[in-house]
Image (cartoon, rainbow, N blue to C red):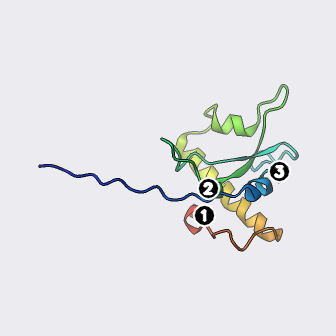
Amino acid sequence: MSVEFKPRPKEKAFRSPAYLRIVAHYPCAHCGIEGRSQAAHADEGKGLGIKASDATAIPLCADSPGRRGCHTLIGTFGMFTRDQRRLLEKKYAAATRERIKEDGLWKPEWPEFEQEQAV
């Protein structure tokens, strides 16, 4: 018996440099430090040439002299299990999108990301 696999087309991920700049403007979603955030993409949904949607971006602080930032600690050092990290990433991404809307910075051309908001 032969099984035929049909390639699944890649979904076009949301891309917006403006959105990423807004995300990076906010304090770190994990520790709250201000002025050191980067727009960090969630790990879920990426791999093998597939990049995560910008909708998954969350503000996480960068490394500084003598201090590892949350971006490194959460994303590289395995501070959380994969499942814990994915839950945090979804929670932080949803909270970030909500804050952008509350601050009146949401652009009408950005999709609502209902799927990513489910926690």
Q: Secondary structure at mark 1?
A: helix
In percent of width and height, residue 38 lies at 77, 45
Q: Which mark is residue 90?
A: 2
Task: Report, in whole angstroms, how far the alpha carbon at label 1 lies from the one at label 2.
Answer: 7 Å
Q: Which residue is mark 1?
A: 117
Quarter of image, res 76: top right
Q: Is residue 111 above or below residue 72?
A: below
Q: Are marks 1 and 2 in contact (CB under 8 Å)?
A: yes
Q: Which residue is mark 3?
A: 27
Q: Earlier in the sequence, mark 1 or mark 2?
A: 2
In percent of width and height, residue 106 lies at 76, 69
Task: Report, in whole angstroms, how far the alpha carbon at label 3 lies from the one at label 1.
Answer: 20 Å
Q: Is residue 17 left or right of residue 75?
A: right
Q: Residue flagged by tag 2: what amino acid is it?
A: Lys
Q: Is residue 60 above or below residue 77?
A: below
Q: Are marks 3 and 2 in contact (CB under 8 Å)?
A: no
Graded by Cα atoms within 10 Å as few (under 14), some (14 to 19) or many (20 or more), the crowding at tag 3 reads some
Q: Residue flagged by tag 3: what amino acid is it?
A: Pro
Q: Secondary structure at mark 3?
A: loop
Q: Which mark is residue 17?
A: none
